[in-house]
Amino acid sequence: MRTGRLNRVMLALVGLLLLVLGGAVLAVGLGAPVPSWWLRTGAHDVLLTRAERTRWRHTGGWWPAVLAGLAAVVLLALWWLTTVLRRRRLTEVVVDTGDGELALLHARALESALAQEAVRQEGVAHAEVVLRGRRTAPTARIWLQLEPHVDPSTALTDFTDRALTHARESARLESLPTEVRLRAVRHRAERVT
């Protein structure tokens, strides 16, 4: 599952849970009948009674542990938020048309063309391309899945000489800094008889 899809699913589940709980609290607070799964019996009950708040007082590490756990949850949520916001995938690339004008090229189109040309290369089973950076100076991150019989250095050289050079020249980019990650296709061991 890709990260974007996972983020959307997690946000939808958390949002649905918060909506149900918040709606139930609001409904009970406004005088609606208390649901059977509700923690308290009446509409005017507090969430934590005095007895529940003081029950663990004799255990010195209880509340610090609770606060540390909550702080860890908040820190994880902030870390997740910063990784989502920092992950900037390009939407368009500026192309110099040669006549003094500029054109905009959809980054997804360039990613797709680069991936398709990489897959046409001998020994490449699958390719994924992500463009990042600025629209005037993009960078590429590429994952190539290679067939078992392919030499990785040959596949990398072929990819940079053909597909990557073709994409850079087609988009009229001075340079296209690229990080390529190679991975072999999983396969069964071959028996030699």
Image: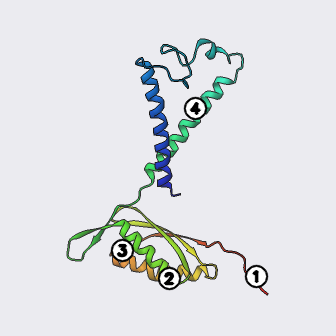
Mark-to-mark CA distance, 3 and 1: 48 Å
**Between discs 4 and 3, the one toward the N terminus:** 4
Identify which residue is drawn at 60% across, 28% down.
Answer: 67
**Between discs 2 and 1, the one toward the N terminus:** 2
Mark-to-mark CA distance, 4 and 2: 51 Å
Q: Would you say the residues marked 2 and 1 are in contact, meaning their CB atoms lie under 8 Å apart? A: no
**Residue type beneath disc 3:** Glu
Q: Position of residue 122 (x, y in %)?
A: 53, 84
**Between discs 3 and 1, the one toward the N terminus:** 3
Q: Which residue is mark 4?
A: 70
| Position above or below: 53 against 144 | above
Identify which residue is drawn at 69% across, 24% down.
Answer: 61
User: In this rendering, which labeled residue sits more in front, label 3 or label 1?
Assistant: 1
User: In this rendering, which labeled residue sits more in front, label 2 or label 1?
Assistant: 1
Q: Which residue is mark 1?
A: 191
Identify which residue is drawn at 57% across, 18% down.
Answer: 48
Q: Which residue is mark 2?
A: 121
Residue 186: quarter of image: bottom right
**Residue type beneath disc 1:** Arg
* Relative side of 10 to 113, left or right: right
Residue 68: quarter of image: top right
